[in-house]
Image (spheres, helix red, strand yellow):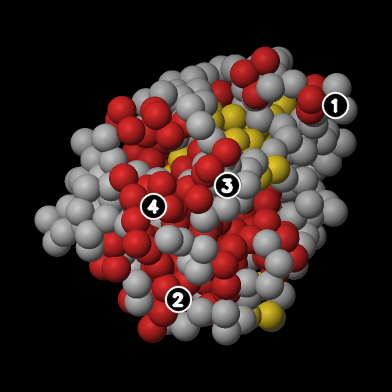
Amino acid sequence: MTINSLFKALIIFVFISSSSSFTIVNAQDNSQQAPAATAAEAQLSFWDFPYLEKPFIDTAPAGGKDKLPVGELGIDGGNKTMIIQLAKEIADKKHGLYDSMLISHKGKLLFESYYLRGRINLPHFQASATKVYTSLALGRAVQLGYLTMDDLHKPLINFLNDLDRTKLAKGVENITLHKALTMRSGIRISNDKREELKENPDPLKGQGLVQAWLEHTAPITEESQSYLYSRDQDLVMQVIEAVVPGTAEDFIKNELLDKMDITNYSWRLGVSGLPNGGDRASMTSRDMLKWGSLTINNGKWNGEQLISPEYLTKATSNITDPTADWQPEIYRYGYFWYQTNISVGDKNYHTNIAWGGGGQHIIVVPDLELIVTITGHDSEDTIMTQVSEHIVPAFVQ
C-alpha cells in the first residue's frame, strides 16, 4: 500500500473512532476476527440472540473455509470513505436495525461488517429471499433436463400425478409454472377456508396441499390471474419434488448447496413435508454472496453451469408489475426476483434483488460486477435508499 493510502486509512480510522465505538480491520491490522456465535449462542432463537457490544467493520476481509476470494476495499475497487461512512451510520442505527452488510466487487469480497445480531458463522433468517433460492432450484432442474423452458408454459397440474382432477376447480389447467413464478396463479381461497385447512394438516402432506388449494379456490380466470403476493412458490416446490430424482430437499442440497460449499444453513419443511418455497431458509451473509455470484456469473459456479442461462435470463427479467402496497413502484418482478434501475449521474444500472422482510437483500448489479448482501430485523427496511445513494455510486468510476 502507498504512503498516501496509509494516510487515508488512518484518517478514516480516526474519523470513525471519534464518532462511535467500532472494531475496524484493514490491511494493516488482521489481528481482529469477525464476531462469531458460540455453540451455545447458535442454539438460541434469533430473537433471543444478544446484540454485539461493538460493530465490526473490515475493509480487507480474511479468506476462510467458505472459499470466497477476498480483496481490499479502495485498492480493488470502491470508494472507501463512502462505504465506511455508511457503515458508521448503520452502526449508529440511523437507517434501521441491520445485522450485516457485505460487498463483493469483480469476484472479490472487499468489505464485511456485522452489527447487532450479525455473526459471521450464524445463518440469518432469509424470509422471502428464500423465494429466489426456490427459483434457482427450478433453474437447476431445467439445466439438468428434468424440465424444459417450454414446460414453464404447460399446465402445472400435468406434473402432479397424485391429484384427483375430478375435484379440482374450474380453470386450474390455466395455472403454469410461469404464472406461479410471477405470483399470478390466480388461486383465490377465502381466509376462513385457509384457517379451516390449517386445523387439519394431515391431508396436506405431499401433493395433498395442492389438492386442497385447487379444490377450494374460486375458478381460475383471466381476471384472477393478476399479480397477488401469495404462496405460489409452494406450487413451484411441488413441481421440483415431482420431476427430480429423490426429494426436492435432497436435490437442493446435492445439486446447489453442496456444489457451492454451503453447509452451515437451515431450510425448514412446510406442512406438505417439502421445503418451504417462500421462507424459513437461513443462510450466512457470506453464503448469500455465493447466490449472488452464481447469478452474476450467468448461472456458473467454478466453471460448472449450475443454472440454465436461458432460465436465469428470464428469471431476472421484467415480466410483471408487483402491486402490493408495500412494494416500490419502481420495482418490477421476474421469477421471484425483483428488478429496478439505479441511477448514478446520467447512467442507469439494471439491478436484481432478492428481498426478504426485515431487511434480507441480495443485490446484484451486473454491469458493475457488484454484489451486496444485507441482513436485518427492521420493520421498515429502507436500506435500499442507501444502496442506491451510497454503495452503487461508490463503485462507479
In three-dimensional space, the C-alpha distance between marks 1 and 2, rounded to whole angstroms, equals 40 Å
Left/right of residue 264 with respect to residue 179 in the rendered view: right
Q: Are marks 1 and 2 in contact (CB under 8 Å)?
A: no
Identify the element where label 4 is drawn: helix
Q: Amino acid at mark 1?
A: Thr
Mark seen at residue 112? none
Q: Which residue is mark 3?
A: 205
Residue at 51% x, 63% y is 162
Circle 2 Cα neighbour tier, 10 Å, few/some/many (<14 / 14–19 / ≥20): many
Q: Amino acid at mark 3?
A: Lys
In three-dimensional space, the C-alpha distance between marks 4 and 2, rounded to whole angstroms, equals 18 Å
Q: Amino acid at mark 2?
A: Tyr
Identify the element where label 2 is drawn: helix
Circle 1 Cα neighbour tier, 10 Å, few/some/many (<14 / 14–19 / ≥20): few
Mark seen at residue 232? 4
Q: Nearer the viewer, residue 24 or 181?
A: 181
Q: In what quadrant of the picture does the N terminus appear?
A: bottom right
Q: Which residue is mark 2?
A: 311
Report x, y in % for residue 10.
67, 35
Identify the element where label 1 is drawn: loop
In three-dimensional space, the C-alpha distance between marks 3 and 1, rounded to whole angstroms, equals 36 Å
In three-dimensional space, the C-alpha distance between marks 2 and 3, rounded to whole angstroms, equals 29 Å
Residue at 85% x, 26% y is 38
Quick check: 306 above or below 277? below
Q: Amino acid at mark 4?
A: Asp
Q: In what quadrant of the picture does the C terminus appear?
A: bottom left
